[in-house]
Image (tube, rainbow, N blue to C red):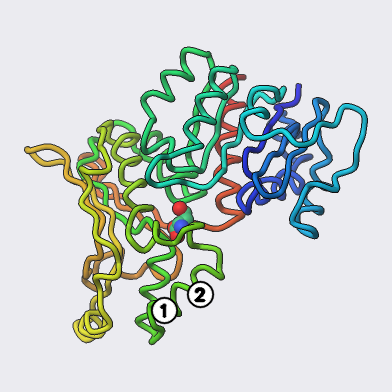
Amino acid sequence: MAHKLAFIGFGGVGQGLVDILLDRSDWLRDKFGTEFQVVSITDLYKGSIHHNDGLDIQQARKLVKETGSLNDYPESEGLVKGWDSLTTIQNTNADTIIEITYTDVFTGQPAIKHCEEAFKNKKNVVVTNKGPVALALDELEELAKQNGVRFLYEGTVMSGTPALRMPLTSLIGNHITSIRGILNGTTNYMFMRMEEGLSYEEALKEAQEKGYAEADPTSDVEGFDVLYKVIILAKVVMGESLTKDEVNRTGMASVTERDLNEAAEEGKKWKMIGRLEKTEQGLTASVAPEKVDEEDPLAGISGATNAVTYECDLSGPVTLIGAGAGIPETGFALLIDLLNLDRDNQ
Ligand code: HSE
């Protein structure tokens, strides 16, 4: 039987997943016995289409690429146009809702509401949206459990690089005492370009053009994006709940051109670091630019690449390096969750 999907939001990440599904559908079916069928797509700006028997995603993808809208999707018997997000979640026959609207760093809405509505309607939810996971994970997991469905969120930290599943599976049995990493591609790219002589504004413009930055780049440069990822890592990997106010946050603008030059003379690098440390007093968490030594594994991570080091009491430190943003990479993060959902249900 097909695994039916509904997309809530259809920006780059959703289109990235659709491209993977179009490219690999035969292989996914042969290898995993899974047939994914998209029944609903709804987007605040691009419009909304639904069909119980499945949409022609090639056509939808082409239309969005060429016209930026789903409005010209051909009419047919059973096709419904114009449902908003909540109407889609309530009425779609999808098994799984893919929540990929933008992250509101202050309220987590409307994504949290979308997840709640999906669970009440007995649908799994897969997100790359950090808001619901950072702000409401316990409540949402409880609601999912009550309704016999699942909530998966691998792509919320380091896109398709398995920053959450790897420590939970491959590093299982260790006590992880600290997590430290470069968890934002935009700021890491900007520091690199500023070291090469660009101004802050020029570097930010480039990061936006390359698609690394959030819809509102304040979230990247002021450290909210990393703050959310730190909260998610604390909860998911260390089992510790943190509120936004418990994470000390400093934005990258505190680093001046002079600081960058000084670091270069000392053979050091400025990096935006997310940090979690278990101490006798409890868990401490911060997001701040730090001047790191040349021999630190994080010093060599340049451009939009991310890296995270897990300090493990049995295996020793393990550093995971990989993409932290990007369209195919984040689309792939959704695929990891979908395939795991199917595997767990088999
Ligand atoms: N804006 C984020 C980054 C994207 O630059 O890393 C992934 O959260």
Instruction: State the residue in front, 331 or 144.
Output: 144
Q: Residue at x 47, y 46 (%)?
A: 103
Is the distance from the Cβ of mark 2 to the nearest ligand 1 atom less than 8 Å? Answer: no
Q: Please provide percent x and percent y for residue 273.
A: 28, 59
Q: Is mark 1 within 8 Å of ligand 1?
A: no
183 and 69: which is toward the camera: 69
Q: Which comes sooner in the sequence, label 1 or label 2?
A: 1
Q: Is residue 256 above or below residue 138?
A: below
Q: Which residue is mark 2?
A: 206
Residue at (27% x, 74% y) in the render: 269
- Secondary structure found at label 2: helix
Which residue is most to the left? 280
Q: Relative to 259, does residue 271 appear above or below in the rendering?
A: above
Tell me whether circle 1 and circle 2 mark residues in contact (CB < 8 Å).
yes
Horizontal arrangement in the rendering, residue 345 relative to residue 109 (left or right):
right
**Quadrant of residue 36 in the image?**
top right
Looking at the rendering, the quadrant in which ligand 1 lies is: bottom left
- Rate crowding at label 1 as few (under 14), some (14 to 19) or many (20 or more) other CA atoms within 10 Å: many
* Residue 27 seen in render: yes
- Mark 1 lies on a secondary structure that is helix
Disc 1 residue type (three-letter): Arg
Which marked residue is nearer to the observer: mark 1 or mark 2?
2
* Pointer 1 residue: 193
Can residue 324 be seen in this snapshot? no
Q: Residues within 10 Å of mark 2 (few under 14, many from 20)?
A: some
The residue under label 2 is which amino acid type? Glu
Counting the numbered discs, the total is 2
Q: x and y percent of residue 85 in the render? A: 63, 34
In the rendered image, residue 153, in percent from the top left (x then y), is placed at 48, 37
Horizontal side of 229 relative to 213 (left or right) equals left
The reply, left or right, for residue 198 in relation to residue 270 is: right
